[in-house]
Image (spheres, helix red, strand yellow):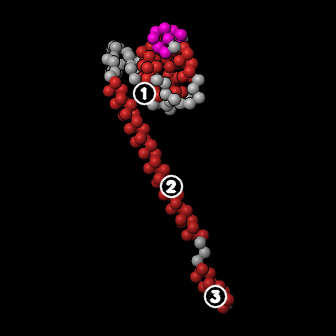
Amino acid sequence: MTVADGGVDRLIHFVDERLAQLQIRREEMARRGGPSYDALTKIRGRSTQNTPRVSTLLRLDDALGWQLGSSAVVLLGGTPLSVTARVRRKARLQAAQPVTAEEIMHRLVDQVHDEIARLDSAHTAIGQRIQGLRAAANRMLEEITVDEDLVTEFSDDVLRA
């Protein structure tokens, strides 16, 4: 299954994946303090990519055992971090410190800057490709343009002979 690059579809994918990992249903998640079954149904049924409310995202984080702000990061194309995520490769699992609102904002801003840089790079590559195509088109025009002086000179030589 392909995971969306961002938005509500991506969030739904990771929520479903985490529910399966925890072996719980949406009703159980709601009992654990997560969004209600109705709220999740509304999120899933959105025909637009409107972002769920912050309170809903924070309740998802809490009920699924994600670090606070993970749902918002998923909406922007990132991946959620569990509260027990390993800080270092061989470190033992331990509860992570809650993420502050400022840290969440910095993570989101960093991701936006990364996306801007990626798009800027793609924009530059497209500009270079367009310049190359223009140069090729100009060379083709030069090659197929009839030089009237050569035609006149050739015609005069053929007529004299």
Q: Position of residue 156 (x, y in %)?
A: 64, 88
Q: Disc 1 on helix, strand or loop?
A: helix
Q: Amino acid at mark 3?
A: Asp
Disc 3 to disc 1, C-alpha distance = 76 Å
Q: Disc 3 on helix, strand or loop?
A: helix
Q: Quadrant of the C terminus?
A: bottom right
Please name the residue shown 51% across and 29% down the image.
50
Range shown magenta: 26-35
Q: Quadrant of the N terminus?
A: top right
Mark 3 vs 1, N-terminal side: 1
Say which of 80 and 59 sits in front. 59
Circle 3 or circle 2, nearest the eye: 2
Please name the residue shown 66% across and 91% down the image.
160
Say which of 161 and 4 sits in front. 4
Q: Disc 1 designates what residue?
A: 73
User: How many other residues sit within 10 Å of disc 2, few (<14), some (14-19) or many (≥20)?
Assistant: few
User: How many other residues sit within 10 Å of disc 3, few (<14), some (14-19) or many (≥20)?
Assistant: few
Q: Disc 2 designates what residue?
A: 130
Disc 1 to disc 2, C-alpha distance = 34 Å
Please name the residue shown 53% across and 58% down the image.
133
Mark 1 vs 2, N-terminal side: 1
Q: Amino acid at mark 1?
A: Val
Q: Disc 3 designates what residue?
A: 156
Q: Position of residue 95 (x, y in %)?
A: 34, 14
Q: Is residue 23 visible?
A: no
- Residue 71 falls in image quadrant: top left
